Amino acid sequence: VNPSVAASAWLARIPQAERIAAHRFTDARLVAWAMGGVLLISACWILSRRGVLGRLRKRLEAGRPRPWVTSALLAGVLALAVATVKAPYDAFAAAWLGSIATGARLGPGFAAHLKQSFAGVCPATLAAMLVIPPLHWLMRRAPRLWPALLGGALFALALAAWTPYALSLGPHLQPAPSGAVRDGLERLVIEAKLPVRDIYVSNDPNVDADVTGVFGRAQVVVGPELMAAPPAETRAFIAHIMGHYAHGDILAIFVIYGCFAVLAVFAAQKYAAPMARFMGARQVGGPADPEALPALLVVAVLSVAAAGLAEGAYLRWANVRADAYSLNHAREPDALAAVLEREWDHESVDPSPIETFLFYTHPPLEDRILHAMTWKAQHGG
Ligand SMILES: [Zn+2]
């Protein structure tokens, strides 16, 4: 059978209306994402251009310099202003995307999202007032060294975030009961030659499946849905996740985030002051100047976006490799296609390249199913 014909047959099992809704959802997500970015950067720009922080600082420091108070209040004002502008937009975007995904009306969703968005304004303001003053202090005390110190700390934090995965930490779990699912997975562990200590079940409905651990010891956890699924599908799915374990993909993601944190900190040291002057705060001398905060926020937003894009690019590549690992070890192309379709996230099955670049951590569904069917054709159908 021609692989593309076989792949089309798999995709045709999804009702056309659902595929069209998914395509509209992804298109809308692109618009919402772009407008959200423009809004956030514009808010920072306008605050900077109108000299809001500069005037506030003059008042606070009329008699003498008060670096800690100024830093805390300017950070609070910036966070409060930006979060207040963003909250209604975020609520609208979430309600709009939700209405496309589910076909529900926009109104009731908007009210719920609005409440949720505004609930985040106060915590964001307080967090800025707590985090920024010590950061400014560090910048003043060690004007040359602070990027290395902060970057190193953030890199260490990224690696620390990986340790629960590496040590397989989590709730106490029961070993998977004997039966067809367990038998299939035990064969898979032998075929893949992985150092799996045991196969566990989780009753948490949010758990799909996971293969955790590091350095010669792994643990397989199967969620309730995959425990009840056809054994071949569970084998195909777990084999994909075993591919991530075998290739160290989880560690790679944390290293990517750690590297981007270091880059962001050095970018802030080099570019925050010129960017602040470009944004209208003409007398800013360095990144530690409280009036450079809107520029620092822009650097942070661009850095987080860049890190997300790098993560997505890595994962799209890693997920092709994990699908290949599943096909080569579980050897279940039809079950892989079936489970991919069942676990489909309702994003467009054939997005534009820009949408893939921005939002996709996996290749689009069409490509993944075609991959499975091509493997099947190459291995005797
Ligand atoms: Zn994956």
Image (cartoon, grey):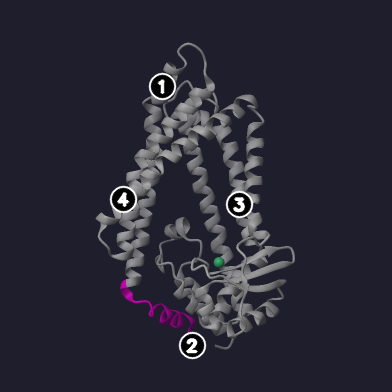
Q: Amino acid at mark 2?
A: Val
In front of the other: label 2 or label 1? 1
Q: Which residues are magenta?
A: 1-17
Q: Earlier in the sequence, mark 2 or mark 3?
A: 2
Q: Residues within 10 Å of mark 1 (few under 14, many from 20)?
A: some
Query: What's under tag 3, amino acid-wise?
Result: Ile
Which quarter of the figure has residue 125? top left
Residue, disc 2: 1
Q: Determine which residue is flagged by label 1.
A: 56
Label 3: few (<14), some (14–19) or many (≥20) C-alpha neighbours in 10 Å: some
Q: Residue furthest right?
A: 216
Q: Residue at x 53, y 21 (%)?
A: 67
Query: Is 319 displayed left or right of 88 in the figure?
Result: right
Q: Name the residue beneath numbered marker 3.
A: 256
Q: Earlier in the sequence, mark 2 or mark 1?
A: 2
Task: Estimate how packed mark 4 is, as few (under 14), some (14 to 19) or many (20 or more) residues with alpha carbons within 10 Å.
Answer: many
Residue 108 visible: yes
In three-dimensional space, the C-alpha distance between marks 3 and 1, rounded to whole angstroms, equals: 38 Å
Q: Nearer the viewer, residue 60 or 50?
A: 60
Mark 2 touching mark 3, by CB under 8 A?
Answer: no
